[in-house]
Amino acid sequence: MSRKFLETETPAWVQDGLITEAQRQQLLARYPAEAVAAIGLLPLLGSLLLGLSVLSVLAANWQALPPTVRLGLMLGSLLGAYAAGNYFLRRGNRSVGQGLLALGLLLFGVDIILTSQLYQLVGYDASGLLAWVVAGVALSFVYESSWLAALTLGIAAAVQTYYAWVLGSFSYATALLSLGGIGYYWGRRPSVLLGQVLATVVLWQAAALVAVSHSKITWFFIPAMLLYAVGDWLPRAPAATRALQGPSLVAAYLFTLGLALFGETDQYAGLLRPPLLAYLGALAGVFVVSFIGKRRQGRLASLPDWLLLLPGFYLPGGLPLAVATLVVLYCYAGAVLLRAQRATDGSGPEQLTLGAVLFVVATMVAYFRLTWAFLDKSLFFLLGGVLLLSLSWYLRRRNAQALANTPPAPDERKFPPTT
C-alpha cells in the first residue's frame, strides 16, 4: 500500500466514520515517507543502470545501425521517458516523475542533434535548438515544475552560447522565450532557487549580447541593473527579491574589486569606457526606476547597493582609481553592516556576516594595493587585528542590545497570582 494513497484517501475514511483519526495516524506511521521514497528509487536506479548499459552498446555501434533503427531508438527513448514520468506523477511520486520528465527533455535535445547529423542538415541552422527551448517552457507550465523551468533556463543558456560563440550571432527568440516565459512562470510561482537561476541566465545572455555586438563590456551593467530594478518593484518576500537581485550585485562587486586590484594603467580604457553621456544617461535612467521601486516597496535601506555602480573606470589608472574603488568597497561594507542592525525581517545575522566578510576583503585589498611597498607587515597585521577585534566587539554589543530589547515569550512572562 502506498503512503501517498493513504495520505490522499484516509481523510475521507475518517469523515465517513470508517476509522478514527488515531487509527489513521497509526496507518501512516506504518509507511514512513523516507522508506517509501527509498524503496521507490530502487527500481528507478536499476532501470537507469540498465538504460546506461544499453546506451553504451548503442553508442559503440551507432554508425552501423540503419537510419530507421536509429530513428526508432530515438523516438522510443523519448516517448518512454515521458510515459514513465507521467506514470509516476499519477501515482503521486512527483520527484521521480519530474526527474523522468527532465530526462525526456534532455533526450529531446539529443534527438534534435542526432537527427541533424543523420540527415546532414545545415550546420549553421540552429532553429532545432530553438524548438528545444520551446519544449522546455511548455513542459514547465504544463507540469508546474520549477525544476523543469530551471533546466529550461540552463538549456537556453547553452543554446545562446552556441549562437554567440559558434555562429557569431545573438538569438533574440531564445532570450524572449526563455526569459519571458520562465520569468512569467517565476512571477506566478516564485522560488529562491529558480529566481537565482533566472537572474544568472539573464546576466549570461546579456554578456553574450555585449560580446556579439563588440560593445564596451561595461554596457553589461545596464541590463544587469535593470534586472535588479525589477526586483525593487516586486511586492515579494525579501528572500525572493534577494534571489533575483543577488547575481547582479555579485557581478557589480566583483567588477569593482577587479578595478581595485588590477586597474594599474589606462590599458583598460579601450574595453571599459563607453561614451560618457550615453552610458551615464542609461545608468541614471535605470537608477531612477530602481529608486522609485524601492520607495514604493519601502526598501530605501538597500539604496547603497548602487555604490558599486559608480563609474570609477573613467578615472585615470593607478593610485586615483585604487583609492576611489577602495572607498566604494569600504562604504558598501559599512552600508551592509548598518542595514543588518536595522533589519527586521530575520536577515540581520546573515547581513552581519556578509558585511564583516566584505570589510575584511576591502582591508586586504587596501593593504596589497596601497601599503605593501612601504608599510611593515607586522604593523599591518597589528592594525588589521585591532580593526577586526573592534568590529567583533561592536557587533557582539549590538547583538546583546538587540536581545535585551526583545520582549520575553508569553510563556516566560511572570503574571501575578490570581485570587
Image (spheres, rainbow, N blue to C red):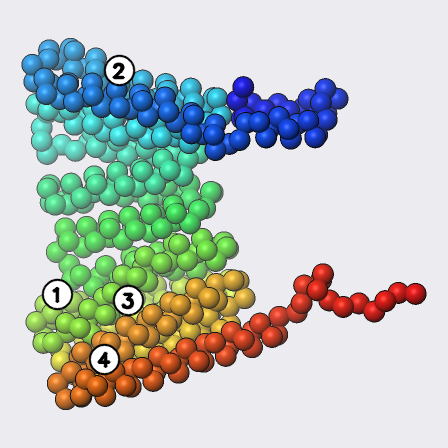
Instruction: Name the element at disc 3.
Output: helix
Residue depicted at x 11% and y 76%: 264
Task: Find residue 207 and report its image quarter.
Answer: bottom left
Q: Do callouts 4 and 1 mark residues in contact (Cβ within 8 Å)?
A: no
Q: Residues within 10 Å of mark 1 (few under 14, many from 20)?
A: few
The label number, if any, that marks residue 366 in the structure image: 4
Q: Is residue 260 above or below residue 221?
A: below
Foreground residue among 211 and 359: 359
The label number, if any, that marks residue 253 in the structure image: 3
Q: Do callouts 4 and 3 mark residues in contact (Cβ within 8 Å)?
A: no
Q: Residues within 10 Å of mark 3 (few under 14, many from 20)?
A: many
| Total labels drawn | 4
The label number, if any, that marks residue 76 in the structure image: 2
On-image quarter of the C terminus: bottom right
Q: Is residue 277 visible?
A: no
Q: Do callouts 2 and 4 mark residues in contact (Cβ within 8 Å)?
A: no
Determine which residue is flagged by label 1.
271
Q: Position of residue 235 (x, y in %)?
A: 50, 55
| Amino acid on which disc 1 is placed | Leu
Q: Is residue 159 above or below residue 51?
A: below
Q: Residues within 10 Å of mark 2 (few under 14, many from 20)?
A: few
| Amino acid on which disc 2 is placed | Gly
| Amino acid on which disc 4 is placed | Ala
Residue depicted at x 41% and y 77%: 392
Give the spatial CA distance, label 3 vs label 2: 48 Å
Task: Find residue 153 and report its image quarter.
Answer: top left
Residue depicted at x 22% and y 61%: 219
Whichever of callouts 4 and 1 sits on the residue coming sooner in the sequence is: 1
On-image quarter of the N terminus: top right
Q: Position of residue 332 (x, y in %)?
A: 35, 74
Whichever of callouts 4 and 3 sits on the residue coming sooner in the sequence is: 3
